[in-house]
């Protein structure tokens, strides 16, 4: 049964040999639509059925994501302190937003978020690229490396946070012990305003760098070998091979990795919540922590909703780039 | 001759360096997990000493028995498992049906495209941005501290992921058998249940594992929407920070008990890991 199925390259499936096998789902899908010539006898019934198939999911998403978002937009035009008993939302128009634009706390949080995302993703990418090249080159223990890298990635973020909190501990922590071995005096890390953000970024890199390694390694392994053979014949150096062959061919995968990592780095919450909760002072107070504090600690529902929406718009701009990238692959595929 | 020899020794040196660097990075990656596991087996007095004990020479199971004696801990374990299982089941059911529909050609291209972009956008938004409205809505519905509240929110976050991932898996299935079934007069529902689902079983399993892990690990909504009846393990772990933060042994034991099943599950998905991580955009 399965044997008969395997080799049939019908319209929907692309031949898997030759060329980078990195296929965007999008392209695969669209290619499918264009080529598929399924003859359907009972076309109208099938169409109706396919709507019935997707309706529950769409309805669910409508209720659980669109409705809350719209509700949040509504709330953002109100002033409402939920901690005051029997308080009612009061309409204030755009006041929440105009106040936020001149609010130094919001601005500094936005800045912290951007610094966090930019440095974490840059370092993750550089380290991840180096390691991806290593594991795809000559290392024989790839299985072991894979398993080791899975550990931080799959670790519950809250656990990662409390775990690193013990590692960073100024008296009983392992990190101060290790740096003590090479003569560096003990630091306070998460307690020091100058080190806290770097400490948080370190944890993020530790936990998320495997994502970059896994994806880039998969990309590198799917590159056609012919180019490499030719380059070796021509006597190209390893650096030249990387710059002239690997990097350009890997560009689509790199873009996917970067955009994914950027979007996910903005989501950071659990680790900072458990590690520093935004402190000391406001040094590590990224937007998600700021929104949490305003909305769920001080119950400034309107203000927190306005913050959420500004954050959303911000993410939306990046999301558009991501979607364009997925769709761009489709046009490349059909042209 | 001499040049050839230096070349060879240079290559050997380079390879040695390569191994050393990789080993160093891997030790750095693995150390926190090692620290977690060893702390879980340390005596309480051994967890808070300076300098810290890196290589513990004596161990105890005391921390684990202490964890099991924490009030309602059994219920919290059960809550975590139940919420993760139900939201995974719900997500995979709704998601694979939707993905199946999107993988077929009966819907107009434009409509499909709009639906898919919308689903993608839902996945991209940070969870904190819907936290406030959810908090207000769940409270208004009197669903605070119920399993239903967490199941709904977790499913809302995993459903877009399921749809996109399953789409890729369905797309990989050959068309021929589906066409044959159409010729035989099988309805869409029959084809979905009897052909596509069995064939896509590995994909479904992987998707289910990913969504289970998401729900099992989720903290923000769990901490916001639950207090006791539906409290899950991440909330319990976070609770160790405040009142009893120096009970590292007990905390690590609980954390280890929580993380180990996830690691085993994750190991099962290795083949499809990249696909899951990239939302189906990069296939291995």
Image (spheres, coloured by chain):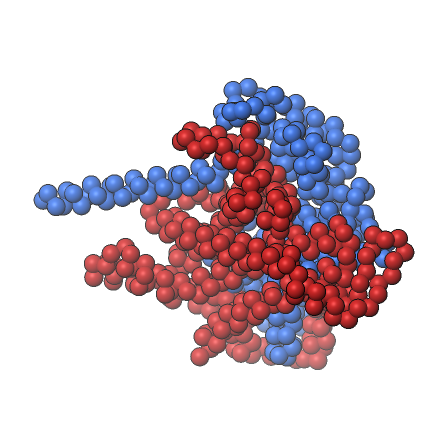
The image quadrant of residue B11 is: top left
Q: Residue at x 55, y 41 (%)?
A: A192
Q: Residue at x 50, y 27 (%)?
A: B54
Query: Which of A304 and A16 lies nearest the eye of the viewer?
Result: A304
The answer to whether any part of residue B146 appears in the image is yes
The answer to whether any part of residue A6 appears in the image is no
Query: Which of A160 and A50 lies nearest the eye of the viewer?
Result: A160
Q: Is residue A245 left or right of residue A76?
A: left
Q: Is residue B78 left or right of residue A149?
A: right
Question: What residue occupies the far right of the structure in this picture?
Answer: A86
Q: Colour of chain B?
A: blue
Question: Which quadrant: the N terminus of chain B?
Answer: top left
User: Residue B261: percent from the left, percent from the top?
Assistant: 62, 40
Task: Look at the picture and state if A172 lies above or below B13.
Answer: above
User: Residue A225: percent from the left, percent from the top?
Assistant: 32, 60
Q: Residue at x 74, y 70 (%)?
A: A94
The chain coloured red is A
The image quadrant of residue B168 is: bottom right
User: Residue A247: percent from the left, percent from the top?
Assistant: 36, 62
């Amino acid at each position: 049964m399965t044997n008969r199925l395997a080799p049939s390259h019908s319209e929907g499936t692309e031949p898997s040999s030759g060329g980078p096998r990195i296929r965007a789902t999008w392209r695969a899908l669209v290619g499918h639509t264009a080529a598929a010539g399924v003859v359907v006898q009972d076309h109208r019934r099938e169409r109706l059925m396919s709507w019935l198939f997707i309706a529950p999911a769409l309805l669910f998403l409508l209720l659980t994501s669109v409705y809350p978002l719209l509700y949040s937009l509504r709330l953002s035009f109100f002033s409402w302190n939920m901690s005051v008993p029997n308080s009612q939302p009061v309409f204030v128009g755009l006041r929440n937003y105009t106040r936020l634009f001149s609010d130094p706390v919001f601005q500094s949080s936005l800045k912290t978020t951007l610094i966090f995302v930019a440095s974490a993703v840059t370092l993750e990418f550089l380290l991840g690229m180096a390691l991806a090249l290593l594991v795809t080159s000559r290392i024989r223990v790839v299985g072991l490396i894979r398993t080791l890298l899975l550990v931080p990635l799959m670790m519950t973020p809250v656990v990662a946070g409390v775990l690193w909190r013990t590692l960073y501990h100024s008296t009983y922590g392992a990190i101060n012990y290790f740096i003590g071995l090479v003569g560096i005096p003990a630091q306070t890390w998460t307690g020091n305003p100058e080190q806290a953000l770097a400490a948080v970024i370190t944890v993020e890199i530790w936990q998320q760098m495997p994502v970059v390694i896994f994806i880039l390694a998969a990309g590198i392994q799917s590159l056609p070998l012919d180019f490499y053979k030719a380059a070796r014949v021509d006597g190209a150096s390893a650096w030249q091979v990387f710059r002239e062959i690997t990097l350009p061919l890997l560009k689509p995968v790199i873009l996917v990795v970067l955009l994914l990592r950027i979007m996910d780095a903005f989501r950071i919450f659990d680790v900072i919540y458990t590690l520093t909760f935004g402190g000391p002072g406001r040094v590590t107070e990224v937007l998600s922590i700021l929104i949490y504090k305003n909305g769920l600690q001080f119950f400034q529902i309107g203000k927190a909703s306005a913050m959420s929406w500004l954050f959303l718009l911000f993410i939306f701009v990046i999301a558009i780039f991501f979607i364009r990238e997925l769709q761009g692959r489709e046009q490349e595929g059909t042209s | 001759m001499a040049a050839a020899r230096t070349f060879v020794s240079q290559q050997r040196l380079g390879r040695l360096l390569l191994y050393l660097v990789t080993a160093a990075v891997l030790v750095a990656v693995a150390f926190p997990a090692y620290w977690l596991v060893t702390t879980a087996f340390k005596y309480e007095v051994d967890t808070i000493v300076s300098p810290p004990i890196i290589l513990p020479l004596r161990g105890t199971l005391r921390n684990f028995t202490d964890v099991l004696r924490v009030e309602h801990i059994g219920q919290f374990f059960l809550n975590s498992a139940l919420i993760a299982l139900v939201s995974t089941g719900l997500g995979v059911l709704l998601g694979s049906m939707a993905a199946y529909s999107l993988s077929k050609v009966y819907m107009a291209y434009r409509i499909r495209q709009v639906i898919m972009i919308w689903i993608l956008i839902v996945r991209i938004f940070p969870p904190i941005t819907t936290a406030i409205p959810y908090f207000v809505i769940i409270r208004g519905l009197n669903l605070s501290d119920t399993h239903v509240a967490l199941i709904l929110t977790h499913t809302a976050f995993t459903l877009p992921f399921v749809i996109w991932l399953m789409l890729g898996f369905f797309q990989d299935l050959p068309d021929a058998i589906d066409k044959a079934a159409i010729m035989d007069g099988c309805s869409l529902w029959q084809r979905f249940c009897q052909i596509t689902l069995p064939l896509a079983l590995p994909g479904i399993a992987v998707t289910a594992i990913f969504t289970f892990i998401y729900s099992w690990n989720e903290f923000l909504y769990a901490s916001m929407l639950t207090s006791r009846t539906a409290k899950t393990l991440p909330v319990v772990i976070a609770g160790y920070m405040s009142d009893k933060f120096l009970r590292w042994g007990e905390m690590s034991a609980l954390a280890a008990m929580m993380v180990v099943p996830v690691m085993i599950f994750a190991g099962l998905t290795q083949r499809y890991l990249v696909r899951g991580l990239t939302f189906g955009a990069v296939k291995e």
